[in-house]
């Protein structure tokens, strides 16, 4: 069946030149955005219950903008004055730049990776005597923990925020030709909100092997998958599929 509508289970991009907007114009399809999950911060009390005292750490590991926001939120709630000599290990340049929202960048000890978490290993080995805190979500990527556990360093995981399924009742009477998912919990949110969901003619697009597995476990047929060598991005995979299907019709 020809594709006319796509629902992307992420927030609408804030940049005008988003690949999704370009895709919409190029393919002449309607693309809507709706978050199926959202982030909620845990309380300072819940952090204390994890036996975490911010004074005990000399370095912070930051893997996302959310980690930055919730670390500084908890610090404020705990009335913890962030010391100027605190070290920040940032997974990517984008995360390091976002850190400027809270600290004067040039006056802080900030260490930056390229993109993949494993690329931070030389930094951890160089500063192996530091006490590291990793402010993280409740569903932290297992690869991050494996990397840190494989090093002889003192590190602590702190759950500072959690991923929660959103209320999707506003979508009850709508339908889309393609639903695009980016995490297993996004698929879980779909079925929590619509327990009787039937795929029928809806095409399912997923990003990542764990998302694909969740879809398959729920009885869904995955029609579009990324990343692949040919289509490393979701937009690329969508473009290839829609172009072929719509041309055939």
Image (cartoon, rainbow, N blue to C red):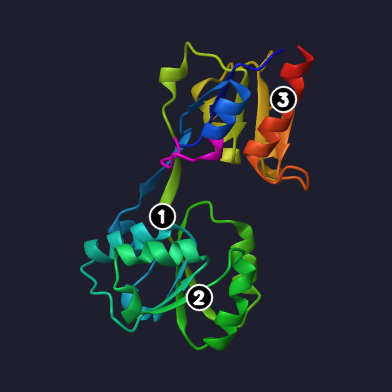
Whether the magenta-drawn stretch holds residue 13 is answered as: yes
What is the secondary structure assignment of the residue under circle 1? helix
Q: Is residue 49 visible?
A: no
Comparing 61 with 74, the one in front is: 61
Tell me if mark 1 has few (under 14), some (14-19) or many (20+) residues whose alpha carbon lies within 10 angstroms of its own. Answer: some
Q: Earlier in the sequence, mark 2 or mark 3?
A: 2
Range shown magenta: 12-20
Seen at 59% across and 20% down, the residue is: 28
Comparing 77 with 107, the one in front is: 107
Taking the view exactly as shown, the residue that stands out farthest to the left is 79
Q: Which mark is residue 155?
A: 2
The vertical placement of 21 against 246, above or below, is: below
Q: Which mark is residue 66?
A: 1
**Quadrant in which the C terminus appears:** top right
What distance separates the C-alpha of mark 2 from that of mark 1?
19 Å
Q: Earlier in the sequence, mark 3 or mark 1?
A: 1
Q: Which mark is residue 243?
A: 3
What is the secondary structure assignment of the residue under circle 3? helix
């Amino acid at each position: 069946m020809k594709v006319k509508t796509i629902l992307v289970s992420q927030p609408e991009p804030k940049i005008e030149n988003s690949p999704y907007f370009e895709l919409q114009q190029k393919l002449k399809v309607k693309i809507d955005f709706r978050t199926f999950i959202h982030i909620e911060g845990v309380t300072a009390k819940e952090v204390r219950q994890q036996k975490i005292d911010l004074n005990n750490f000399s370095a912070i590991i930051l893997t996302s903008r959310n980690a930055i926001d919730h670390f500084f939120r908890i610090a404020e709630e705990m009335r913890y004055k962030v010391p100027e000599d605190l070290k920040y290990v940032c997974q990517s340049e984008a995360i390091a730049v976002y850190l400027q929202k809270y600290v004067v960048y040039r006056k802080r000890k900030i260490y930056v990776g390229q993109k993949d978490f494993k690329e931070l290993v030389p930094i951890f080995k160089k500063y192996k005597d530091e006490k590291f805190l990793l402010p993280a979500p409740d569903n932290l990527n297992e690869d991050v923990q494996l990397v840190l556990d494989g090093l002889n360093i003192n590190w602590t995981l702190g759950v500072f925020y959690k991923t929660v399924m959103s209320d999707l009742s506003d979508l009850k009477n709508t339908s889309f030709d393609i639903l695009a998912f980016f995490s297993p919990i996004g698929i879980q949110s779909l079925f929590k909100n619509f327990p009787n969901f039937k795929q029928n003619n809806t095409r399912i697009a997923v990003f990542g092997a764990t998302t694909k597995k969740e879809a398959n476990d729920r009885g869904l047929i995955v029609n579009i998958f990324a990343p692949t060598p040919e289509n490393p991005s979701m937009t690329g995979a969508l473009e290839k599929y829609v172009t072929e299907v719509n041309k055939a019709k």
